[in-house]
Image (cartoon, rainbow, N blue to C red):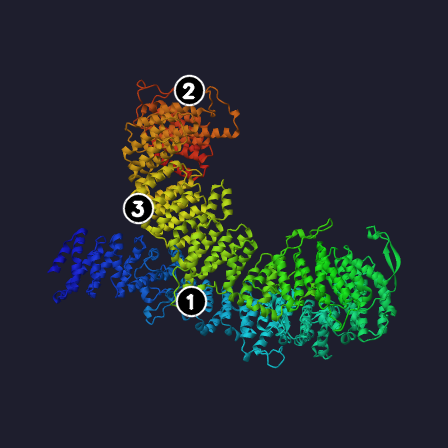
Amino acid sequence: ELLERVLLRLGNADSDEKLEATVGKFLTPVILKMNSPHNAVRTKASKVVEVLTHIKRRLSSRGQVQIPVEALLDQYAAEDSSTFLKNFAIIFIAMGYPRLPLEQQAGLASKVVGSEDKLESYQDKLFALLLPILSEIKIPDDPAQRSKLLNLQDKPGISTNFLSLLQDVLLLPYGITQDQEVPPGLSPYSFKRIIANNWRAEELEKVKKGIVRFLCASVFTDVQIFVPLVVASADTRFSVATPAIAELSKLCTMLDFSSPAVTAPLYTLFAGNQSKLTDRQTRPCCARVRQKLLQYLIKCRGKSINVTKGLQVIFDGLFGTNTNQKCKVLALNFVELVLRDGPQELVSKVSKVILTGITKVIGRDSTEPNDVQNAAYSALAQHARSFPQDVSQDLKLVLGYFNNLASCAPELHSSIREALVSMAPAFAWKTKEKSDAMEVEENTNPSAVKLDGQQHLLLAMLLDNAESKIQIVQNVTSVFLTSCYPEYYAPARYLLLLIAGERNSLRENVTTYLYGTSKKDHVNYNLLSSIEQVENRTNSESISDFNHLSLEQRRVVLPSFPVMMSHVHEMANKRLKKSNTCVVVGRTKLPYSLEVYEELLDYLRLCLWYSAGVVSAPGDEKYTQELRNYIILHYDEDENNALHQYVQFVQRSVEAKRSESNLICLYDLLNAAPELFAAKQLHLLEPLGNTLKDVSETMRIHVAQVYGILWAFGLTDDKFDEEVGECLNNLTQKTLEHKHGWLLVLGHTFNRKIAMLRHEKKAKDFATWPQFVNAVKIITKTLCESQWLLVSAAVKCISMIGKAVQIPNVKVEIQVPTNEADDDEEMTEYTSIDSSTKLVVFGVVFQLLRSSSARQKIREESARCLGYLAIGDGEHFTKRNLEKFLTLAKVQKDAALNIAISEAIVNTLCGYDVNKGKPDEKFVNLHCSDAEFEQFLNSLIRLVTEPNPHSRQAISVWLLAVVKHCSKRPAVLAKKELLQFAFTELLSDDSEFVQDVASRGLGLVYTLSDSNSQSDLANSLLDQLIGGKRKVNQVTADTEIFAEGMLGKTPTGGNITTYKELCSLASDLNQPDMIYQFMQLANHNATWTSKLGAAFGLKTLSAESRQKMQPYLGRIIPRLYRYKYDPTPKIQNSMISIWDTIVTDSKEVTERYYWEILRELLDNLTCKEWRVRIACCLAVRDLLKRSNGLKLRSDELVRRTPASDAMEVDEIPEPELKELWFQLFRVMDDIHEGTRVAAHGTASFLGKLCVIASSSDHGKSGTAVATSVLPYLLETGVGHKVAEIRTVSIKTISDMIDSSGALIAPHLVTLIPCLLRATGELENSKLSYVSTRLGADNEAQEAVDTLRAEAAKSHHTMETIGKCVRYIDYPVLEKMTPEVLELMRSSVNLGTKIGCAHFVCLISIRLGKEMTPVAGKYIRACFVGIKDRNATVRKYNASAIGHLLGLAKEQSIKSLFAKLDELYVEQPGNRSIALTIQSMNKRHHELLKDYMDSMLPLIFFAMHEEASEETKANVELWKDLWNDVSPGDAGIRLNLNVIIPKLETSLTDASWSRKAQAANAIQTIATRLSSTLEEPDRVRLIRLLLTGLQGRTFEGKERLLQALAGLCKGLNRTHEICPTIIDAAMREARKREPIYRTNALASLGNILDQLEADRFEEVYNMSWNLLEKKELRKESDDEDEPSTSKELTADERNKRAQTLNRLKEVVWETLGKSWPRHSIETQHRYQLFFAENCTSILAESTRPVQVSLLAALTKYIERLHVFDESAQLPDLSQINQEKKIKTEAPAPQTRETIVEKICTDVLAAVALAAGVPHTGLKKEALNIVLMLIKRQSGAKNQQPLNLIRQSFELNLEKFQRDSAPEIRCRIKDIEEKLGKLNPGN
């Protein structure tokens, strides 16, 4: 019964209101019946269904009827609701929810989402209701409220399902239908549930935009929204993708990509979920989404790298159907990530599978684009680095890629090279197991190397590629050869030598590997060793073997000479058999090019010397005996003998072409074993003889020494004498170079021959040997030659002969110059004198030595020559030499010459060649006794105190040489203390070289002493160096204070500092004797590295000394470490030398003494000497460079102490770190610029290390670093007065915030203002300069300033602020507000101003309504900003105000609008006012509706500013703003009550422009509102304009008249104000200014036309005279004295003519419009006159005036009363007589005659116009004809019509000449009308 009653009520509801009330009342109770516990009720279910079905039908057709959705939702969500109830409830919920107002829908959103948590199908229906409104839901400002928006915090299941649905919608493609297959990324189920909505593409786009907006609103957690946003960012429509990408960029900085929870959904979405239920199985997503997914998968770290799923991602990305080029590149990048950072155990199991995948992408046949192949090769390189075992098992890979490298495009070269280079270590010898690789068998030759099959194959492949024509192939080959084989493996070295010889660009790298240094001249021979000698050297390494050296100075093991030579021989023979690999030089066939041959010879020579047991530069005379022993032991004339092969190899090269390399190699062999080789090489004499003519002096020297040995040992005595005699006879006839060569041959020949004879103990009287005597005579004569080349050769010959034998003292005739004073050598006359050879030799050689004009090289040779003469003839030369040498002390000489003299001195004193050593142990020099030696030594010591710098240098070198080579002499041993004082005196010399020599001398003196006297010497030295003072030198008039070139350096001498440092170190250790060991090592002068300096090589530290130092290392190491970085290169080099000697493993020692070194550096960082401060800065930087980051105390505490021992709360975890920052900041504020720069670099580097160390990945140690550093940087660094310190601090803090942000919160009050200030201070000064320079060009300046602003926003300071904002709450903001506001008001830097505005925007978004109490203050500060001179600053502040408006109090908002209004009055061109309002409207549109009264008048007024080039953009902006805020006419009409007061104010303003602007606004109101404008408002505006029109003319006044004309359009013509309007307009039209008068007349015409008033006579009277004017006159003071046009320029005349013509046009327009419609009398008076005058004036007028005249005639005809059939002529007696025309003819009296007369006149004008070729004119003429036909069409009198027809027919042809469409149309219309009027035609 109840249900029947409900049904009845529903039936009676005959309106929507009644139906809504009934449904609202009964729907929920009826549905509830389904849930009734009473069976009786439930049995009536069919009745219930009937009622509900009826309701549903009724509601379906009535879309406006509301349904009680909330009640239904409550009913649905009730725990006891049955499925049957839910079925019906959900139907009505789905129907009613979309009908609700948007606010109600948003309010019920949480209920809709949360109602169902079990049934998926219902859940989907409910979720679907929300999708269309997600874009409209209002998001709360408070972050806490946002997360509770849907109340899903406790419903993770619903939350997950809802997000899943959103993701599915985002995956749905546009334009898809139900009939199509399931799209990528969706399952059949998910597709079915969302396709049911049947969205069109535009609707789907809107839904997706709403979803993205909702996801970005912080309703869900970052992890939850991450994947849906990734999907959205791949959308094909920008409106969806762009906001998603923007949000993701923020999100990624906060997500933890090492968490599987973040990244697991990426894998699932990429490849599908592999569900067992077919319906729920998702398809892999499309390529576009995959591309985005891969971009984020590449960010995975640690546990989030899922190898199993990653493998699927990789192969799907590379070979799947849904992929593209970009996907493949990203998939390969992901491969790199998996291989590099993935779990190694898992990855190793699938690494081969991955390798297979990579190799499919690349190869010669690959069709993939280059960027995909590049990525694949990079992945391959990573694979080879991570899993070398996979690569090493497949040599085909390497072979294939070598082939690819040779044939691929150049773009792929670098990536293939990287892959191959990464593979090389996989084949390295050391990585191979002994069982399957190269082995060195025990008890066999250590140089024998076994290869497995794969190594052989690799070598064969490298052999093919070593001589490739492509450089990069050779480059990679060289890498394999250096990486895969041991250093001493001959075949690999051979191939490297081929590459070095063939390819100049690779030579340096290969040479570095082969020799240990990039240039052969710089080889450190102590670091080389032969594989044969390695065993022997381990126990007797020199001190330099302890050096921990760089790649440029590394150890090199050379292959065994026999092995290397055999391999070269074998390969050379193979090449000689092939014609394509041979090179023919002259008549000789060579297996290699000359460059390769030279490389091979150099290397083989080195191997030979080192295999012989020599550890020195090849060719060193001291070790020739070792080479001789080796050759004699191993040489055999057998084809398989390596030495025999070497001889043949060298011989072939010499035969082909003589070069330095092959000649030196040949000389080595002949010099070491002449008896073995000389006789067999005699056939080389001929080619060698030819080379003696060579232009190169060096070549002649090398040939001569070989030639000499061949003659001496290869020829018999008779043959020898014969050849020498012939040579001497022919010598005078030879050329200069040839003569030089043969002279050297003579010297070498006799030197070798005499030595051979003495060795064989053959008795021979050299004084009676004619060839020898003749040779000596010729050489002696040559000494007196003027040619330096010959003199040099003669000196060398004398040296060689004098060293071997006593020179025969025979008479010789020599040429001497007679005119010594003559400088011209060519004019010099010579005279012959007789003398003896010894006298000439000694005199001339000494003179050459002393002469400063002689060449340096000859002087050095001369010095040595004197020493050698004393060896061969000590009796004659010893005493003479010693006396003469002392006289040379003060002569200016360089170091090399002094070393040469010192060599001569010791040779003289010792009686043998000290370079070769003693002839035998018992040798005694009989010609220099101990007494003579002591006398000479005393003479040297006495000269030490000489102040002459040349003398001091000479004595220092000579003393050192004497002490070194004559240390066993009693005089040296007795005078140790004297020698020490001498050397100490020299140690304080100004010359660094002298200081070096002295320090070496001190070391020698110390080593000569026994242990008792060593301590005395050490103590006295310390006293002298540290405590004593240098003796003041005596200065005489001749004393040279500074040596030449000395003033360019510091006169104090850099090196004395070195020794003082060392002394201080030695005394600190209480080990004074160590000073000597340090001094020996500190010598690093360039001179010592020369060949001359080799004579003074000193003993290095013995193993015993090194052992003695061990206990003191803890104190030595920190100090030495600091000294290593001294900015003085001299000191630095010395200290590095000492360090390398003492420290065997630099890295290990530095690590062991880390804290001691750091303490030493911290203590000295603020030392008073600037060079110490710089050294400490540089040293700190290097100390901190550790592969595993900063070394921390907290790490050590964790390792040492148990976990229970917690650190004290107040204790700083890393005190050294804080102290280091403190000290660095002090040094950054140093007075010395170099120190500041060094400190800045160190601080920047320390900052980077602190950032890495404080990362959250480092756990407690990270927190310890942050806790130690952050407070100090914030308190001291950020606010420091030094800009560089602020910069470093800010940069460091910025980078640290990510990892330790929570610690920064207490310091934000200080930090934010400092960062804002720094943003301006750190701006690029060049940009600022450019902006200032562009001051005159506003557009360019604004463009530059915009760039500056963008740079400031993206600056790291602003990025830091962006990171800090999330830690700012209201209390923090309140504290920092005063300082921020002060910055905003007072800062002058653009960067700071922009930064402040941007910060305000950020903080307003972050805090929202919390910020309300201070919003007003910030608005006021920003308001100051919008008045700034800089447009960019104004723009940013405008944006900031827009952000703040929604947070401000009502009073602040009203105040702001008032201020904006005032500002507009002051600065109408200020664009920022419009930008401010635009920003407000953009962000707070709803809020602005409450303040329309304040805002709209300003916008409306501003948009009517006069548009010019400058103001055009502003006006457009205001117009856009008006259209946004209040579009359409309704906006004007509704707000007229507030707009009119604004206009009233402006019209009464003193400003003319504002009056004109107000008039423009009024005109817009009149035009847009037209007839709808209320009369009171219209009249009010008219009165305002009339008031404004009073007074003088001003610019823009015409706008008031135009507005007035506009307002007249809808005005009641009978209104009392009409006459006032007309009078005002008439008054203005009489003004004399022509342009203004033109506008005034135009407005007057419009006013008279609208009001239909009869003022024709007045208009006519005041304007007719204008039509007769021929030119405009200048306005002059005296009106009776007009100026003539002759005084005007052509431009001015032209301008005036245009103005006059325009004025005439307007006069005609006005006359036409003012022709009265209703005043018959006026018409009658003027009708004939007007028509006739128009015709008469027409011909004389310009075209535009003619057009206006004809238009006026049209108006005239249209309104002419006399044309009406019923028209009566007025009584002439009653009215004034008609205007008389100056003509004789009587005026027509009847209507017909008047009409005919008017028609005739008008048609005459038409006929005139028809003949003019002007379209506009013809158009107006035809308009007149049409109007005449129209007016005469109903008349009884046909005469006028006939006239019209005749006239038209006459002129038709003229009209038809114009083909314009408008002419043709009008002609057609006229013809049609005339045809209708005359049916007879």
Residue at (52%, 76%) from the top-left corner?
393
Residue 220 image point, x, y percent: 32, 59
Identify the residue position indicated by label 3 in the image. Answer: 1487
The disc, 3 or 2, on the residue closer to the chain's N-terminal end is 3
Residue found at the very far top of the displayed protein: 1773
Can residue 1563 be seen in this snapshot?
yes
- Disc 3 versus disc 1: distance between alpha carbons? 59 Å
Identify the residue position indicated by label 2 in the image. Answer: 1783
Left or right position of 1796 against 1225: left
Q: Foreground: 1447 or 82?
A: 1447
Identify the residue position indicated by label 1 in the image. Answer: 1198
Task: Name the element at disc 3.
Answer: helix
The kind of residue tagged 3 is Leu
Left or right position of 1583 against 1074: left
Depth check, mark 2 against mark 1: the one in front is: 1
Q: Quadrant of the C terminus?
A: top left
